[in-house]
Image (cartoon, rainbow, N blue to C red):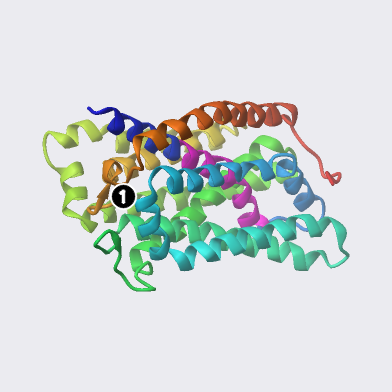
Amino acid sequence: MESNDTLSLIWAGIIALAVFGYVVMDGFDLGLGILFPWLEKGDDRNTAINTIAPVWDGNETWLVLGGGGLFAAFPLAYAIIMPAVYTPLIAMLMELIFRGVAFEFRARTTRLWIWDSAFAFGSMLAAFSQGVILGAILQGVKVEGRAYAGGWFDWLSPFSVMTGVSVVAGYALLGACWLIYKTEGRLQDKAFALARLTGAATIAAVVAVSAATPFLSHDYFSRWFTLPGMLYVAPVPILVGVASILFVRALRLRKEGQPFLLALAIFFLSFTGLGICMFPYLIPGQVTIFEAATAENSQVFMLIGVGIMLPIIIAYTGYAYWVFRGKVGHEGYH
């Protein structure tokens, strides 16, 4: 393997890490917003907000790293993907801004219902938009002459809507499990009940997306259902099943930390399955990691910067979660 190919794989791994880091970190606080309408007004909602208030700003760092890394390391893929998903992408960014404003203003207003509604609405639509973007890329993008050749609404399809709903369900599950871990008493009881509902919805969504994805492309189908390849990828769905069973058991035994960890395991395994489908393509069936990569010198230069900054990001993120570990109450964080 040439050195440039090795660098391209390293950068693909960094971007995958950033995307998964964002899903893990921002997924549960978006999930809290999605669950907001089902939480009682007053102390319960304030407590839920307090579980994420110290860390939620830093969670979106991973989104910047993923998007910036794609732009810098794989400019061709960035130039093709962006116009293909402009509409849901712009919607997602506006909704993230919207929920951020609502998050801050709810502590400084007498009309709390307005900002609580905005927080829930922005969280739900941001999650849905992210799922739609995932589905739009996974179902394929039209490319001609190294440029996007599709229409303005090619991203919209039954499959992308299904992935959008799936991400909403998955984030809601992470939010419920986070509440189980960080709260106690009545709110924790509510979180257990919500985790059962969102867990069932997430598992059903994983099954539905997993069943539909192989039929989007012959390449996808052959990777999962032809020998000997299927022997290598079979552990992924098997482990999803095992994690799902353990998750249900953890809820039944009222474990506090295990549901969140097992929900993350389900997300990681689903993420791995998507990677199996797409590799080595960044744009399925059109542009590979190696074709989209920037010049070797540029990759090396940027890798030095990432090598310095990524450990710092991981360190301060871990430190923030360590400092604010433990249960929280309803007293205002702001």
| Percent coordinates x, y for residue 232 in the rendering | 21, 31
| Percent coordinates x, y for residue 39 in the rendering | 70, 55
Quarter of the figure with the N terminus: top left
- Please state if 325 lies on the left or on the right of 109 as rendered: left
Residue 166 visible within the image: yes
Residue sitting farthest toward the left: 227
Foreground pick, 117 / 60: 60
Q: Looking at the picture, does residue 102 appear above or below residue 315? A: below
| Percent coordinates x, y for residue 218 in the rendering | 16, 53
Mark 1, residues whose alpha carbon is within 10 Å: few (<14), some, or many (≥20)? some
Residue 161 visible within the image: no
Q: What residue lies at 24% left-to-right and 28% top-to-bottom?
A: 2
Q: Which residues are magenta?
A: 17-36
Q: Looking at the picture, does residue 140 appear above or below residue 17? A: below
Q: What residue lies at 31% left-to-right and 50% top-to-bottom?
A: 210
- Please state if 13 lies on the left or on the right of 129 as rendered: left
| Percent coordinates x, y for residue 41 in the rendering | 78, 58
Residue flagged by tag 1: what amino acid is it?
A: Ser
Magenta span contains residue 156: no
Label 1: state its secondary structure. helix
- Please state if 326 lies on the left or on the right of 151 as rendered: right
Q: What residue lies at 40% left-to-right and 53% top-to-bottom?
A: 78
Identify the residue under disc 1.
Answer: 210
Residue 84, located in which quarter of the rendered image?
bottom left
Q: Looking at the picture, does residue 73 appear above or below residue 218? A: above
Magenta span contains residue 32: yes
